[in-house]
Every structure is written in C-alpha cells, then in structure tokens.
Amino acid sequence: MTNITIFGTGNMGSAIGAILSGGGHSVQHVNTSTQPGAITGEIVILAVPYAALSQIAATYGEQLAGKVVVDITNPVSFETFDDLVVAADSSAAAELAAALPSSKVLKAFNTNLGPTLVAGTVGPNKTTVLVAGDDAGAKSALIEAITSGGKVDAIDAGSLKRARELEAIGFLQITLTVAEKTTWTGGFAVVR
Amino acid sequence: MTNITIFGTGNMGSAIGAILSGGGHSVQHVNTSTQPGAITGEIVILAVPYAALSQIAATYGEQLAGKVVVDITNPVSFETFDDLVVAADSSAAAELAAALPSSKVLKAFNTNLGPTLVAGTVGPNKTTVLVAGDDAGAKSALIEAITSGGKVDAIDAGSLKRARELEAIGFLQITLTVAEKTTWTGGFAVVR
C-alpha cells in the first residue's frame, strides 16, 4: 500500500483517486482553496489546472522535497486554443521540475480524458496511462500504484523530456474532442 | 476517381498506394532514384524520409504548383533518438509548405505505422489517418480518397499548425515501439 496525496477535487482528481483507492492505496485529498494540513503521501498528484502549478510549487516546495510529484496538466492557451502556453521546446512538467528541484517530477494522466479513467476504457481498449520521468524508481512506484487495481494500464513513456510529446497528444486530443471529431469517451487509445 | 502520385516505393508508399487503389483511384508510383516523367496526380504523396523532402521540393517545385502535396514524415533525429530535427515551434510539414508556397501542403499518415495501414486495424480499432492542413478543399479531397475504399478512416485534425502535434505523436509512437512498450501492429489508435 502506498500513501498518495491528490491536490484538486475536480473530475480528474476524483477519477484518479478512485483508481488508486481501488488498488488498495491510501488516498489523501487536498483542496487547495482551504488550508491543508501536512501532505502525507509519498506520491503527490497535482490534479489542478496548469495555472495553479507555480503557486503550489511556491507554497509547498519544502513539503514536496523528496516526494514523487505528478503533473497531469495540459497547458493549452484558452485564448487562442491554437497553442500551448509553455515554450515550444519545454513542457509544463519541465517547468514544474525546475520549480521543485528536490522532488521527483513525473508527467502522467494528461493524455487521459476524465471519462476514460472513470470507465477504464477508451472504446474497445483498456485505458492506458502514459508516464514520463527521469527517476526510474518514481516511475515504477506510480505505475504500480496505478495498475494494482487492474482497472487501467500504465506504460513507461520515457524520460521527462517526453512530457513535450505527451502534452502535444493531450492538446490535440482536446482540440479533436471540442471539434467533435472524437468524443469524451474516446480519443487516443494505446494498443500494445 | 482521383489521380494520385506517390513518391517512394517503401513500406509506407506501398501501403498507402494499396489503400488508394482499393478506393478506385488511379495511383502513379514514382521512384525518385530513377528519372521520373511527368507527375500526373492532382494529389502527390511524398512517402519518403524527411531528409528527402528538400531535394524533392527543389527538383519538382514547379510541377507541384497548384497540387495537393502530402507530407508523411517523422523528422526524428536518428543520432539521439531523443529529439526531432525540426525547430521546436515548427514541423516538417511547415518547412515543406514554406518550400512549396504554390502547393497545398497537408500532413497525413505520419501517425500510422505501416502494418496498421496494411491491416486496416490498430488492435480492435479501425486504423484512422489524421490529416492536417490549411486548405479545406485539399483536406476534403485527401480524406475522400483515403476513405472511399472503406479500409481505413480519416479525420480532419485541424490546420497545418497541428502538424507539430502530429509529429510529436509519430515520434512518441516510434520510441514506444522501438522500446517494445507497444508493437508495430499497435500504437496509438483513434476512437471516435
């Protein structure tokens, strides 16, 4: 059993919490709009919008030192809906890693639409979480926590540099969904 | 019936040719290592490696004026296997469009592994070709040509700017396949 803390109580935070609880893990939900107590998780999942990451890093940086910190954001520009707001050669996860140099930052869940985490399926396929990061032990721990309940699958997608590609997939999936080319229960599935 | 020219006679060129022939279209295959005659297709698919694009644009630019030209490349650095060789805020398709200002350049097929075009399936899913470009008529013509045989599906993935995201997907899919996280008959499937 792993102790996991989830910041954010929206659709994504709830869906991720259900997957992890279903795997027998202990989940602490933190609502950032109230005053949180101590962060008890060894793995901390930031299920918040991109814009909230810098504030969380500034406020909780010391408490997050040594922990696995998971960025799930898609830093889409909601003004243009045609760009990401991070630098083209960077990613939200790379920015978070720079802001939390003592944490083991991973990218995960940003290529999964919420309903596919709830259902455990993307059409006829099992939902697969893509996990990128530079710390092999941190990736293994997260993948084990995600998959132990058997509801969804998870794959090591490479180094944290691959967060750039994961954020591109998340972005394109959102644009396809909003354009009604695909649906919220579909999108990109991973087939082994 | 549409007249289509395919540069390149490798796995991708052959698979794409079979899909288009199967839809009742007339396909001219051009082998760039021999002296080609006139390009007869209204749609010209460049099923060649990224490195060959600039030479083709230089040699055939005038003949390609006014035509729909389709870039299928994934400009992966085969030195590092950790980067694309195009600028981070650009794409191979954007470079080709700049080199062929009188052509209607589209990005397509780069998110499809060859075996999934041959089989028509990605695991339990029908293979879907993602098509990006700035000319709506050109996109419609290519999507119609791809789908008329019924073997694979095709979706309008947005403006040519989205080639950046399509190339990110193609790149990540290749790295996952080479790392044996996924297989050549799997990868990313599109679910509606």
Image (spheres, coloured by chain):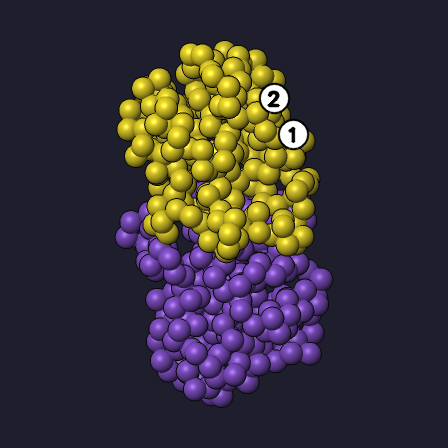
Chain colours: A yellow, B purple
Residue denoted by label 1: A118
Quadrant in which the N terminus of chain B is drawn: bottom right
Question: Can the viewer see residue A24 in this picture?
Answer: yes
To the question of a shared chain for discs 1 and 2, the answer is yes
Q: Residue at x 39, y 68 (%)?
A: B95
Q: Residues within 10 Å of mark 1 (few under 14, many from 20)?
A: some
Q: Residues within 10 Å of mark 2 (few under 14, many from 20)?
A: some
Q: Nearer the viewer, residue B155 or A114?
A: A114
Answer above or below: position of B180 versus A144.
below
x%, y% of residue A115? 65, 35
Q: Give the tally of numbered discs.
A: 2
- Nearer the observer, B111 or A81: A81
Give SS at disc 1. Answer: helix
- Say left or right for A153 vs A182: left
Q: Residue at x 31, y 19 (%)?
A: A62
Badge 1 amino acid: Val
Q: Amino acid at mark 2?
A: Ala
What residue is pinned by disc 2? A18
Q: Which mark is residue A24?
A: none
Q: Is residue A107 above or below residue B65?
A: above
Residue A59 appears at what percent x and percent y? 37, 24
Measured as percent of width and height from the top left, residue B148 is found at 70, 67
Dots 1 and 2: beta carbons under 8 Å?
yes
The answer to whether A76 is drawn above or below residue B31 in the figure is: above
Q: Does the rendering let one see residue A155?
A: no
> Which residue is found at the position 58% from the left and 17% from the top?
A21
Please provide percent x and percent y for residue A185.
Answer: 67, 40
SS type, badge 2: helix
